[in-house]
Image (cartoon, coloured by chain):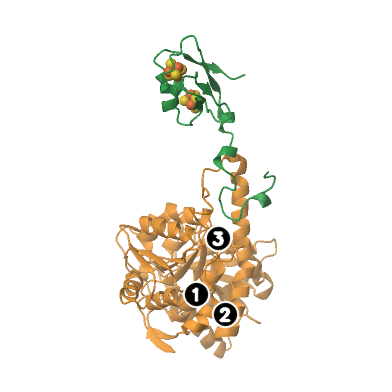
């Protein structure tokens, strides 16, 4: 059934279809309508779940960690300062293998005060041990949230997942979303069945007790393996999803019109849709441009991205965040993955910060820049800030 | 017995009872009870945070379970008769 809904409602309905059992959330713009919608669905009895009202995001994460320990499928959602407030519990959740799924309406971190979208909140949590999936549109938010449970709860993985939707641009924009039936989702997503769960009566155990230096390193190695296993599982779950629902997103990375391309731009989240339109238009004009949609940032798809070395002669990376003192996070890691003495030159474009629109014109100028640099065979400068007031005139 | 990272459970959880964890090997000082001075008030038993002071039968002298005693010295500090001496482990 087609519904005309925002990405936030898509996330809420995905939680309902996934038969989430415990929700703990604290409102924060632009995530609020996810938790509001779920409160309504629980209140009217349309959804059979416990809704825990908490005093902060830190508590929300603590509550879902506890609920997950007793074997409940858990959900929360947040943004920006709320995600930052969760920080220490995010690391706990991942360290103790709680497969929580959490949409994040990505928003810039303050100050000064801002409520608008960029990726600086989720990028700040790239080391928390969570899987991080970026969504292009509202349909992908719904589909990815459902798939995220299946990936996260796999006994080989047991790792929490953030489903990232750009604040306002997706979270508050309505689009047509194909809503699967409850029966179809039940058939795809079995109930959460962890190997260990808190059971005071028949099997009392100590969970997450102190781990001394003699085993900590081995514990971290196991969590590393969990994350590595997820790479295959993401692809496998998506194939199964495609077979049942007829929609597919290309695994960890989608190569869009990259065959025979001279240059490619790597991009994630909501600007991907805009960039695909630009690629189509430029291709119509005979320009050999391609797009790489980064769907999963954690796990990082280095093995897929390294193929760019043999595919194109110039790579651009668009970051909707900036790491002070170093550049864009996507850029740093992709340049790292592509590094080889004869690797392809690579350039970073920073834009869309704090809700600045990423326009078709911006993307077209990036492609023009990449095409002209590809003729020279090397980049002019490592980082360009797109459409910066007072910056180079070529962005006008 | 855990030998490799592969032996760890899939999620951080203890597979044995706390009784299997010999916290006594954290100890650098051991309590030694002088039965000449001890009046069997069992204040040491009451204060030991690790339940390592044991009294077998009523009126027995207290003994120290060195498998678990971490050597914190609380018992020696609380003893009203100075009957417990903390001795360095060799
Ligand atoms: S506190 Fe001192 S006197 Fe009392 S039982 Fe213990 S060792 Fe003996
Ligand atoms: S030294 Fe500490 S742990 Fe050991 S018996 Fe005395 S109070 Fe208990």
Are the residues flagged by discs 1 and 3 in contact, CB closer than 8 Å? no
Count neighbours of disc 2 (C-alpha within 10 A) and say few if under 14, some if 14 to 19, many if 20 or more. many
Q: Is residue A363 visible?
A: no
Outermost residue on the front side: it is B58
Is A210 placed above or below A43 here? Answer: above
Q: Is residue A280 visible?
A: yes
Is B48 placed above or below A360 here? Answer: above
User: Which residue is the site of mark 2?
Assistant: A241
Real-space Cα separation, disc 1 to disc 3, in angstroms: 30 Å
- Secondary structure category for the residue under label 3: helix
User: Which residue is the site of mark 3?
Assistant: A332
Are the residues flagged by discs 1 and 2 in contact, CB closer than 8 Å? yes
Is A307 placed above or below A3 here? Answer: above
Measured as percent of width and height from the top left, residue A39 is found at 32, 71
Q: Is mark 3 within 8 Å of ligand 2?
A: no
Chain at numbered mark 3: A
Near-viewer residue (A81 or A160): A160
> Which chain did the image draw in orange?
A
Q: Residue at x 68, y 61 (%)?
A: A340
Measured as percent of width and height from the top left, residue A102 is found at 44, 66
Do marks 1 and 2 share a chain? yes
Are the residues flagged by discs 3 and 2 in contact, CB closer than 8 Å? no
Measured as percent of width and height from the top left, residue A361 is found at 44, 80
Chain at numbered mark 2: A
Closer to the chain start, of discs 1 and 3, is 1
Do marks 3 and 2 share a chain? yes
Q: Residue at x 34, y 59 (%)?
A: A110
Quadrant of the image where one finds ligand 1: top left
User: Which residue is the site of mark 1?
Assistant: A146
Q: Residue at x 64, y 75 (%)?
A: A312
Near-viewer residue (B79 or A153): B79
Count neighbours of disc 3 (C-alpha within 10 A) and say few if under 14, some if 14 to 19, many if 20 or more. some
């Amino acid at each position: 059934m087609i519904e005309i809904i925002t990405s936030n409602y898509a996330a809420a309905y995905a939680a309902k279809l996934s038969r989430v059992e415990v929700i703990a959330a604290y409102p924060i713009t632009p995530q609020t309508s996810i938790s509001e919608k779920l409160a309504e669905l629980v209140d009217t009895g349309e959804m059979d779940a416990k809704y825990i009202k908490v005093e902060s995001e830190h508590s929300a994460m603590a509550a879902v960690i506890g609920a997950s320990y007793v074997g409940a499928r858990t959900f929360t959602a947040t943004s920006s300062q709320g995600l930052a407030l969760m920080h220490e519990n995010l690391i706990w959740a991942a360290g103790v293998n709680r497969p929580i799924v959490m949409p994040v309406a990505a928003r810039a971190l303050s100050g000064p005060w801002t409520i608008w979208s960029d990726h600086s909140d989720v990028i700040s949590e790239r080391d928390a041990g969570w899987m991080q999936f970026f969504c292009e549109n509202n349909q992908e938010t719904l589909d990815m949230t459902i798939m995220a449970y299946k990936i996260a709860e796999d006994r080989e993985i047991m790792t929490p997942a953030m489903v990232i939707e750009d604040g306002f641009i997706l979270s508050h924009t309505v689009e047509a979303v194909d809503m699967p039936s409850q029966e179809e989702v039940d058939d795809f997503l079995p109930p959460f069945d962890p190997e260990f769960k808190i059971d005071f009566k028949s099997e009392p155990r100590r969970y997450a007790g102190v781990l001394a230096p003699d085993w900590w390193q081995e514990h971290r190695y196991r969590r590393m393996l969990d994350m590595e296993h997820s790479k295959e599982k993401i692809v496998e779950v998506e194939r199964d999803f495609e077979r049942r629902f007829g929609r597919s997103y290309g695994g960890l990375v989608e190569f869009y019109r990259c065959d025979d391309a001279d240059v490619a731009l790597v991009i994630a989240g909501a600007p991907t849709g805009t960039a695909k339109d630009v690629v189509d238009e430029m291709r119509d004009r005979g320009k050999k441009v391609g797009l790489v949609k980064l769907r999963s940032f954690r796990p990082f798809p280095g093995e897929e991205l390294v193929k760019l070395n043999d595919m194109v002669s110039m790579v651009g990376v668009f970051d909707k965040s900036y790491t002070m003192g170093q550049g864009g996070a996507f850029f740093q890691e992709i340049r790292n993955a592509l590094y080889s003495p004869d690797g392809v030159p690579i350039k970073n474009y920073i834009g869309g910060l704090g809700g600045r629109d990423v326009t078709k014109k911006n993307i077209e100028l990036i492609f023009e820049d990449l095409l002209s640099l590809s003729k020279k065979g090397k980049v002019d400068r490592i980082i360009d800030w797109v459409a910066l007031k007072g910056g180079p005139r070529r962005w006008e | 017995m855990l030998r490799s990272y592969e032996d760890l459970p899939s999620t951080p959880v203890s597979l044995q009872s706390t009784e299997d964890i010999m916290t006594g090997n954290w100890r650098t000082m051991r309590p030694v009870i002088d039965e000449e001075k001890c009046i069997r008030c069992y204040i040491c038993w009451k204060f030991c945070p690790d339940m390592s002071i044991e009294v077998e039968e009523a009126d027995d002298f207290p003994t120290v379970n060195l498998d678990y005693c971490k050597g914190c010295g609380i018992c020696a500090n609380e003893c009203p008769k100075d009957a417990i001496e903390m001795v360095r482990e060799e």
